[in-house]
Image (cartoon, grey):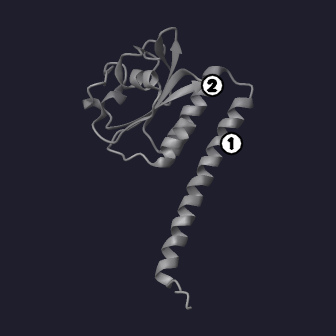
Amino acid sequence: MAVPRQSYNEVVPKAKELEVRLEKTEQQLRLFQKISRLMVRDLSFQEVLKGVVSLVVEFTEGDSCLVYLLDGSELALCAANTPHPAAIGKVRLSLNEGLTGWVARERRLLSISREAYKDPRFKAFADLLPEDTFEAFLSAPLIARNRVVGVINVQHRLPHQHTGGEMEVLTT
């Protein structure tokens, strides 16, 4: 019985695909290593958050990363990769408000590739957050000991189809 041989045209694309997947996996590993190194350094909590948002923006090639942490029954903006001194601590959402509140309440990842600001759950803070005009929105709940402690959002100015790798990194 003859075994069919794969042609060169079938093997090369598979090898390229595997190389791309390996490179993306290596990028994720490097990101997690950098975050791990941040956690063991003698930094303030705010400095760690700032480092994490910078690394997430770098990995996702996003234009914005915002971290909201639960403060009582509200989510408070605690960190951003771009300076928002007027918004940090002042932008607050209940768990019934906005896309961010929905992510926390439902404990689910949310990915919107275009016109996120048109979603009926969206709540704007345009006077404080220019990101409210951005197209793409990726958000994940931050969970510790099986409790939601916050939400992390990544936004792109232009439409952007979020990859499985981006979603995986954000949920991790």
With respect to residue 88, does 140 lie above or below?
Answer: below
With respect to residue 162, does 14 lie above or below?
Answer: below
Q: Residue at x 31, y 25 (%)?
A: 122
Q: Mark number for residue 33? A: 1
Q: Residue at x 33, y 19 (%)?
A: 125
Q: Residue at x 64, y 48 (%)?
A: 29
The 10 Å Cα crowd at callout 2, few under 14, some 14 to 19, many 20 or more, is few
Q: How many marks?
A: 2
Q: Residue furthest front?
A: 1
Dot 2 falls on a residue whose secondary structure is: helix
x, y (%) of residue 117? Answer: 28, 30
Identity of the amino acid at label 2?
Glu
Q: Which one is in front, 116 or 129?
A: 116
Q: Mark number for residue 47? A: 2
Q: In this image, 76 relative to 125: left or right? A: right
Residue contact at pointers 2 and 1, CB within 8 angstroms = no
Q: In this image, 99 relative to 167: left or right? A: left
Which image quadrant for residue 92? top left
Pick the quarter of the image with the C terminus: top right
With respect to residue 91, does 51 lie above or below?
Answer: below
Identity of the amino acid at label 1?
Gln
Q: Which one is in front, 15 or 54?
A: 15
The 10 Å Cα crowd at callout 1, few under 14, some 14 to 19, many 20 or more, is few
Q: Residue furthest top?
A: 72
x, y (%) of residue 43? Answer: 70, 24
Pick the quarter of the image with the N terminus: bottom right
Alpha carbon distance from label 2 to label 1: 17 Å
Dot 1 falls on a residue whose secondary structure is: helix
Q: Residue furthest bottom?
A: 1
Which image quadrant for residue 40? top right
